Image (tube, helix red, strand yellow):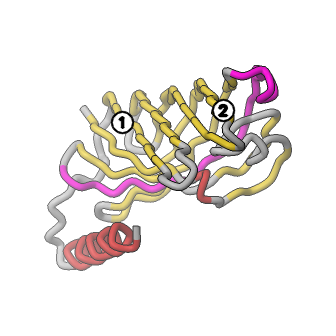
């Protein structure tokens, strides 16, 4: 993980140097309108207790100009854990429409805010796991896109500010369940790729 973040930092530094010299090989997000597709994938298999986590978040949207966009993120999560010889499997389904506001474009870096709502449905397979439940959130997610090439970006959502009610966000049911505030926890970090057409 350290190597990954070090690579991002090195790539970012090189991009800033190129931008200062006027040799930016990236586009400036000046497209008038267009489709974007992207998403993120998380998979983890822990060898100790054999818990498995899979989270898939595809998204699609439309850029109205270089400042505004709107889209929807869908989500599927699968968590499998074994404790005291009992296997616990939970499935999570999400849908999150959002409006995106790009507030800064500097060379290959684009900072944005995603404001919207999210709805999810959590379905444990065992009745002892707490039963099915629905939840929702309303709030803002700050993010950054790094242009890797024309029409191809590395996008990161870095946190959440808003309100949640019965909303499942991590590997444990208690994380981010009820309440409001500002969170920059690891469960809020989403790193993915985006294609722009």
What percent of the width, then of the height, locates residue 12? Answer: 31, 71
Disc ID at residue 38: 1
Label at residue 9: none
- Is residue 130 placed above or below 28 in the rendered structure? above
| Residue 134 part of the magenta-drawn span | yes
Q: Quick one: 98 or 154, which is closer to the camera?
A: 154
Q: Residue at x 74, y 35 (%)?
A: 167
Crowding at mark 1 (Cα within 10 Å: few <14, some 14-19, many 20+) = some
Image height of 78 relative to 44, above or below = above
**Structural distance between the alpha carbons of marks 1 and 2:** 30 Å
SS at mark 1 in the image = strand
Residue 85 in picture, x, y percent from top left? 67, 38
Q: Which residues are magenta?
A: 126-149
**Circle 2 SS class:** strand
**Residue at point 33%, 44% (across, down):** 193
Residue 12 relative to residue 91: left or right: left
């Amino acid at each position: 993980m350290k190597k990954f973040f070090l690579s991002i930092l090195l790539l970012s530094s090189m991009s800033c140097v190129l931008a200062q010299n006027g040799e930016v090989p990236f586009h400036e997000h000046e497209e008038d309108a267009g489709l974007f597709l992207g998403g993120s994938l998380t998979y983890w298999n822990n060898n100790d207790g054999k818990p498995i986590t899979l989270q898939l978040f595809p998204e699609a949207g439309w850029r109205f100009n270089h400042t505004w966009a709107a889209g929807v993120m869908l989500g599927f999560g699968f968590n499998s854990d074994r404790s005291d010889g009992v296997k616990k499997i939970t499935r999570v389904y999400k849908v999150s429409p959002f409006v995106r506001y790009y507030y800064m474009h500097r060379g290959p870096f684009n900072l944005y805010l995603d404001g919207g709502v999210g709805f999810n449905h959590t379905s444990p397979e065992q009745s002892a796991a707490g039963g099915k439940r629905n939840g929702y959130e309303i709030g803002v997610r700050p993010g950054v896109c790094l242009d890797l090439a024309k029409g191809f970006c590395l996008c990161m959502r870095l946190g959440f500010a808003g309100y949640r009610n019965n909303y499942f966000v991590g590997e444990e049911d208690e994380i981010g369940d009820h309440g409001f505030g500002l969170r920059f926890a690891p469960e809020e970090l989403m790193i993915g790729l985006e294609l722009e057409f």
